[in-house]
Amino acid sequence: MKINSLLIYSLIIGSLAACSVQEKDQQGQDTDEFEMEPVQYEAATTSDTVMVTEQMVDRHFVRMPDTPQGYRAQALLEVVTAEDEEQILPFVYEHYDPDFIDQVPQDDHKSLLLHLQKQIQGAEVESIENLDNAYRIGVMSNLTNQEYLIDVYFEPEAPYKISGIRVL
């Protein structure tokens, strides 16, 4: 009889202890909920699938290919979106093919890039297409809501400098 009483007593104490632990655990969870602030994503940072919330901004992110041509195309986009006239000529001499620089007067290179700066202010890259020795970059201007296609042509051999630009 003592064993049965002891067994029942142990079960009751064990149950009370388990309930007590669960209650404290629930209290801890409730407390944590009040201390933590909910975080809402304002913009996605990759092209991966992310959880959509009402506060999320719909953005499409495009990365330039990790190639010498991609590096030069990215440099072109940076100089055009920088809206800094002083960066244009150093960019031209660093990234343009010397034959392209010789074929087109310096002022024409500068005026084309200045024109692009004005047209695609606040732009986002929407797409990139790899053509034969060229990239076609789709850019959407946030100010005018107009899309521009920029074809950037490259030398066929290293160092793959820019050998032409066409805006569609």
Image (tube, grey):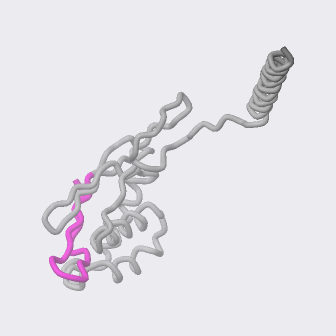
Residue at the left extreme, as displayed: 132
**Which quarter of the rendering shows the N terminus?**
top right
Residue sitting at x 39%, y 47%: 47
Q: Is residue 139 left or right of residue 85?
A: left
Snapshot quadrant of residue 20: top right
Numbered-mark total: 0
Snapshot quadrant of residue 72: bottom left
Indicate whether residue 24 is drawn in magenta: no
Q: Is residue 91 above or below residue 17?
A: below
Q: Is residue 162 left or right of residue 38?
A: left
Q: Is residue 17 above or below residue 99?
A: above
The picture places residue 90, in percent across and down from the top left corner, at 41, 80
In the image, 97 versus 158, the foreground residue is 158
The picture places residue 63, in percent across and down from the top left corner, at 36, 57
Residues in magenta?
Answer: 149-168
Residue sitting at x 22%, y 77%: 104
Snapshot quadrant of residue 21: top right
Residue at the front extreme, as displayed: 1
Q: Is residue 124 above or below residue 49?
A: below
Residue sitting at x 40%, y 49%: 61
The picture places residue 136, in percent across and down from the top left corner, at 23, 57
Residue sitting at x 79%, y 32%: 28
Indicate whether residue 164 is drawn in magenta: yes
The picture places residue 98, in percent across and down from the top left corner, at 24, 85
Q: Is residue 90 left or right of residue 96?
A: right
